[in-house]
Image (cartoon, rainbow, N blue to C red):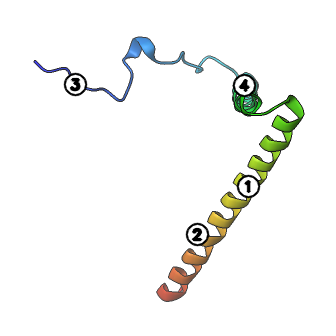
Amino acid sequence: MAATQQLIPPPELSPPSIAHLAPDERARLWAQMVDEGDCLLFESFVRRSADEQSARVAMQEWLERRDADATAAKIRMLRCRSSVDQADGR
């Protein structure tokens, strides 16, 4: 029987349940995960930069470009929706 590739990890590799956590504990866990993600991202800029200050500048510029791109994409989607709504008479 050929081995199949599985996209969903088996149960023993799944993350622990957060069902038992109170809402404030879930929010705290989410914030911690966001902070850790930001640290990983910053570390990648540090590895590619001459020093920590240039890494901060590079990351800030990247964040600003990402935000600008995301905003532009949202505007395009809203414009497309607006033209569809007008065509449908909404």
What amino acid is at disc 4? Glu
Q: Is residue 5 toward the left or the right of residue 78 in the image? A: left
Q: Nearer the viewer, residue 35 or 83?
A: 35
2 and 3 marks in contact (CB < 8 Å): no
Mark 1 — residue? 65
Question: Which numbered disc flags the more N-terminal residue, 2 or 3?
Answer: 3
Mark 4 — residue? 36
Give the secondary structure at mark 1: helix
Give coordinates of residue 11: x percent, y percent: 39, 16
Measure the alpha-carbon separation of dots 1 and 2: 18 Å
Measure the alpha-carbon separation of dots 1 and 3: 40 Å
Question: Which numbered disc flags the more N-terminal residue, 1 or 2?
Answer: 1
Q: Is 62 situated above or below 50?
A: below
Most extreme residue toward the left, as rendered?
1
Most extreme residue toward the top, as rendered?
12
Which callout, 2 or 4, points to the residue nearer the camera? 4
Question: Which numbered disc flags the more N-terminal residue, 4 or 3?
Answer: 3
- Mark 3 packing: few (<14 Cα in 10 Å), some, or many (20+)? few
Residue 4 got which mark? 3
Give coordinates of residue 32: x percent, y percent: 74, 24
Mark 2 — residue? 77
What amino acid is at disc 1? Arg
Measure the alpha-carbon separation of dots 2 and 3: 38 Å
What amino acid is at disc 3? Thr
